[in-house]
Image (cartoon, helix red, strand yellow):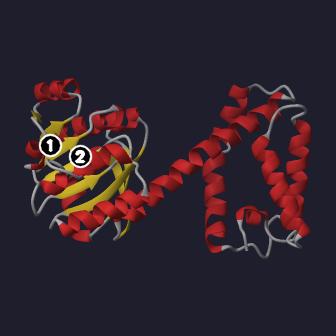
Amino acid sequence: MDVAFIGLGQMGSGMADNLVAAGHQVTVWNRDRTKAEPFAERGATVAADLAAAARAGTVVTMLANDAAVEAVSFGDGGLLAAGPGLLHISCSTVSVDLTASLAEAHVAAGQRFVSAQVLGRPDVAVAGKLSVIAAGAADDLDVAQPLFNAIGAATHRVGGRPVMAAAAKLAFNAGIPAIMQMLTEQFRIVAAQGIAADRMAALLLEVNYGNRLIGSYGPIIAEKRTEPAGLPLRLGRKDVGLALAAAGDAELPLTELIARRMDAIIAAGGGERDWSAVGQTD
């Protein structure tokens, strides 16, 4: 199908390459034209401007932030000025407010809009193995599906409103630094007792730590099934305290925060609830 790709950074370049490799008629545009020109050698058309790119009828944007997406969408020569019928597929990680504004503006312009967030690093984008989290009208997602197939290993449709995909991506990204901090503190705890970080990293993989936790606790937390307790929070607090002691003088700010949160729940009479309740407010 005819498709324009706007934004040829670390993620976008790999995605656009895979659209070309899948046989789509790809037009590319980038604010820095030098990033677009190599795509001509790969079979893509380099657009002179945004208006020329929009003539493809379907446009994928993969840009750095809200301001960049606003710049290519609004104003003279922007995507919203391209006329009715355009399908804008936004893969950029942007705010839910902007996503809602874009959805409304495209409808007002007689155009279509979906949010298709992607999970994966640049090497995953190059390999065409991204996970696509998509939301929008079902008919529009069906039109976009061949493009999703070219850039990703799987597509997950999360709802009919584009903001749903934006929120899902932001939820994923909010968890990443928390996990990185958690891993850092786990390494500090074992290092205090002589275990090398690489051995702990291997152990986390050997016991399938992440998948086991999500598989076990994801449904429990989603459903707020804190009773009967698999492990009472008061006993979980004991283990967190022992971990803090094992770490010696190592800094464990996340673990200390969790300990304080547990203390507050126990003081309020919640010590017998399942320890998965640590993040709940009711």
Residue 270 percent coordinates (x, y): 85, 71
Counting residues from the N terminus, which is met first, the one under dot 1 or under dot 2? 1
Residue under label 2 = 72
Q: Which residue type carries mark 2? A: Val
Judge from the rendering whether residue 2 lies leftward or rightward of residue 208; answer left or right: left
Q: Quadrant of residue 144?
A: bottom left
197, above or below 129, in the image: above
Residue 28 percent coordinates (x, y): 16, 37
Q: Residue at x 21, y 68 (%)?
A: 107
Q: Which mark is residue 50?
A: 1
Q: Residue at x 43, y 37 (%)?
A: 121
Residue 201 percent coordinates (x, y): 67, 33
Task: For the residues labelled 1 and 2, say whether their Cβ atoms are less than 8 Å apart.
Answer: yes
Residue 56 percent coordinates (x, y): 9, 49
> Marks 1 and 2, Cα distance to the nearest angstrom?
7 Å
- From where the camera sits, is residue 131 visible? yes
217, above or below 246, in the image: below
- From where the camera sits, is residue 208 visible? no
Q: Residue at x 66, y 67 (%)?
A: 221
Judge from the rendering whether residue 271 lies leftward or rightward of residue 44; answer left or right: right
Q: Residue at x 43, y 42 (%)?
A: 120
SS state under label 1: helix
205, above or below 167, in the image: above
Q: Quadrant of the C terminus?
A: bottom right
SS state under label 2: helix
Q: Quadrant of residue 52?
A: top left
Q: Which residue type carries mark 1? A: Leu
Mark 2 neighbour class, 10 Å CA radius: few under 14, some 14 to 19, many 20 or more: many
41, above or below 107, in the image: above
Q: Which mark is residue 148?
A: none
